[in-house]
Amino acid sequence: MSIINNRELSWLLFNDRVLQEAQDPLVPLMQRLRFLGIYSNNQDEFIKVRVANVIRTAKLKTKKPILFTGDYTPLELLKKINKNTIEAQNTFEKTYCELLVEKVRHGIVLLNENELTAEQIKFCHEYYANTISPRLVPLILRKSSEIPFLPDGRIYLAVKMSSAKSSATRYAILQIPVSDKCPRFIVLPSASGQTEIIFMDDIIRLMIDEIFFMFNYDEISVHTFKIMRDAVLTLDDDVSKSLVEKIEHGINKRKFGEPIRLVYDKNIPEDLLKTIAVKLGMRNSAALISGGRYHQMKDLMKFPRVSSELEEKLHDPIFHPDIKPFSSILNVIRKKDIFLNYPYHSFSHFIDFLHETAIDPKVDSIFITLYRTADHSKVINALINAAKNGKKVTVLVELKARFDEEQNIHSTEVLQNSGVKVIHSSEMLKVHSKLVLVERREGSRMCGYAYIGTGNFNESTAKIYSDFGLFTTHAGIVEDARKVCEFLTDTHKHFDYEYLMVSPHSMRSEFESLIDNEIKNAKKGKKAFIYAKFNSLTDEKIIYQLYNASQAGVDIKLIIRGACCLKPQVQGLSDNIRIISIVDKFLEHARMAIFCNGGKEKYYILSADWMTRNLDRRVEVGAPVFDKKIRKILMDVFKIQWKDCVKARDLSSLDRNRYVKCTDPDKFKQSRSQTALYDYYKEQTNG
């Protein structure tokens, strides 16, 4: 038996935890529906990236197990993944049907084309004519010609037309034109006290005879399907092209990636399915997955907000007690380090920091790394403002942020056209760090203000992602931040860092040294512990080192949201390692590590996970925390989350996603960590 969990199967279990949230009756109804959308979106990306990679490996026809397969060959792993995804899809469909019934009890009804009133039919006819029809392009499938290219990320209707008078059968395909101006869900005219909604798919079904009026047929049937393509971005080796050109070319190639899965309505006629599959070149039956009447259910994330009573009630973000409205943030940071924990704290503090530096006459330069930004980004607007005010603004835009490449190319153009200096990472090195360095002239010297974070500079995701951010003027951290900025500007240079953890240079070796130190202290009979929180734990070297630490007697508590390849609570191997995973209304995205260090505890926040890619192939930054009050906050945050017995799952039962049991039922309500953390920060503000 392997002592390491398979990464892909472990990730699927994480997504099952997301599906559990959709099944949880304590979660507000509309949020449960959106969790189904989140689950579906996660699953699609997993298939297009991770499963595509396994398929490529399987084509090598190796019989040897590959890294982190848990002794599976690629083909065995692929079969296991397919089995798990089909079982999960059945659970998804069952949960979705249950939620439909529950919604009816609250006066929210999803209707199909056969359940409409005369008034609603008239409305759908007008909506189709004005909104859908101009965007709809029917494609007739002919035996003698190839099928037009069908992009993934879309929903399609497969149409079969047959006539008793003729043996001829016609097939056609319609792409459902979902967009911001043409949403998937349309609210219908409804009786008082009732909200009735229809899928756009079903409006098209209603109008199907009008669409194909020119053909003679006795019977017509319409069935949904979707295609999933290999989404791995590959860059060519043409040295005459810039990285932007290579990324643009790679995006274009990815759009035309090989189809790896076809999900179809289980009631589709066999001849229609076969026609589509053959024309797509998908002859492998394992790649054909049957499903329900509707696909591309990630659109549930945008389900209309029709009842505030059925929505998750989110508290207003808290303003940090040391940052006063309409006052200088730089003055506060100069006096003390400032710690922010989004979304409990307002992300507006970071935006205000950028706005202040943009107009402060003493600020000389701003350096920032951007990985993912919001649409119409306030961060980018502030940087443009700074450049227009004469600041030297340098922005590293990471073009290789998966599925955000086009957005980042656009951001590059906008910034450059506004006088901002934009740089990009090398082809082989992705910059995932969350770093800002502001240089300000104060008297005769240049003073640095640094920000190190765990999450993206994105005001949209900062409302729903749980992340840390640290403002500091600590001289050593600022100097190391300068070195990181210089390295990113010229990657041929190499630096030694005294305070910051920086991958791919020193982060791995520093973590190894910190873990070894705990092992040595435990063997000497000293108190030794490692408390850490990451999105994923998949690095083999770190895992084996943690096993060694456990066997030496180090107390190890880990909070891992997603994939976890370490097996906790295995007798003789990991007895002293306990792991929980928290999935709740906010995405747990913050990373932190606390080491006992013989009683002189060391605290870090960082952008990296304990994954090989983060430690060896990305530029990541982790910062030590020296301020005693902030160190206490970090320990309190960890303890609050460790006590969660509402949304925490015990990963020692990895294959079951079992909830952590509450030992004190009277404190059950206080043990939902995300609620408890809001109350914790609110109390600090009021105090």
Image: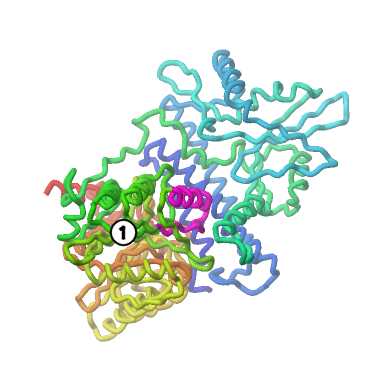
Residue 587, image x, y percentages: 38, 51
Question: How far from the left and from the top, in percent, is residue 327?
Answer: 17, 47
Q: Residue 410 in magenta?
A: yes
The mark tally for this picture is 1
Q: In terms of depth relative to the viewer, which is nearer, 391 or 535? A: 391
Say what amino acid the circle numbered 1 marks. Ser
- Residue 122 quadrant: top right
| Residue drawn at x 50%, y 21% as measured from the top left | 188
Residue at x-position 32% and y-position 68%: 482
Q: Which residue does the numbered mark 1 point to in the structure image?
A: 365
Q: Position of residue 631 (x, y in %)?
A: 21, 64
Of the pair 185 and 437, the residue shown nearer to us? 437
Identify the coloring.
rainbow
Asked if residue 570 shows in the view, the reply is yes
- Vertical relation: 116 (above or below) 303: above
Question: Left or right of 267: which side holds 626?
Answer: left
Residue 454 painted magenta: no
Q: Residues within 10 Å of mark 1 (few under 14, many from 20)?
A: many
The single residue placed furthest to the right in the displayed view is: 166
Q: Which residues are magenta?
A: 395-417
Q: Give the residue at the far top of this rendering.
A: 118
Whether residue 538 is visible here, answered yes or no, is no
Q: Residue at x 74, y 27 (%)?
A: 220
From this view, report whether residue 460 is shown above or below residue 651: above
Q: Residue placed at 71% from the left, 35% from the top?
A: 173
Residue occupying the far left of the picture: 687
For this view, does 665 lie left or right of residue 101? left
Q: Is residue 675 left or right of residue 49?
A: left
Q: Secondary structure at mark 1?
A: strand
Image x and y of residue 218, in percent? 79, 23
